[in-house]
Image (cartoon, helix red, strand yellow):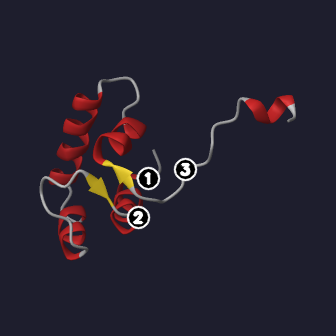
Amino acid sequence: MKLDTMNKEEPFKVRAYGYGELAQLYFPNVSKKSASAQLRRWIKLSKTVMPLLLNLGYKSGNRLFTPAHVKVIVDEFGEP
């Protein structure tokens, strides 16, 4: 492996993520609980994200985002 590629971060991939896992990608410098609370706030404050998530089968309290859910979030908030 080349030295210049050893320290590069992996590019973000749209896949299934746990709620806390995705939240910590957006908020890496806080606890998982705080990151999850902040992501929840972002989602609730967005006029577009929650309706789209609900249309894709998301239910409040879900602990897993499907790839389709993650795409909606990334389309709204950008890549973490």
Q: CA distance from mark 1 to mark 3?
A: 11 Å
> Left or right of 21: which side holds 14?
right
Of mark 1 and mark 3, the one earlier in the sequence is 3
Given the image, on which type of amino acid does mark 2 rest?
Pro
Residue at image location 76% in from the left, 31% down from the top:
6
Q: Is residue 77 left or right of residue 64?
A: right
Location of residue 70 with respect to 57 vertically, above or below = above
- The residue lying at 37 percent from left, 69 percent from top is 68
Rounded to the nearest angstrom, the CA distance separating label 2 from label 3 is: 12 Å
Q: Which amino acid type corresponds to the residue marked 1 in the rendered image?
A: Gly
Which is more N-terminal, label 2 or label 1?
Answer: 2
Question: Do the residues under discs 1 and 3 have CB atoms within 8 angstroms?
Answer: no
Residue extending farthest right? 2
Looking at the image, residue 52 sits to the left or right of residue 79; the answer is left
Q: Nearer the viewer, mark 1 or mark 3?
A: 3
Q: Which residue is mark 2?
A: 67
Q: Residue 3, which numbered label?
A: none
Q: Position of residue 19 (x, y in %)?
A: 29, 47
What amino acid is at disc 3?
A: Phe
Say above or below: 19 vs 29.
below
Between label 2 and label 3, give the one nearer the viewer: 2
Q: Is residue 56 above or below residue 72?
A: below
Task: List the residue tagged with mark 1.
Answer: 78
Q: What number is the disc on residue 12? A: 3
Q: Residues within 10 Å of mark 2 (few under 14, many from 20)?
A: some
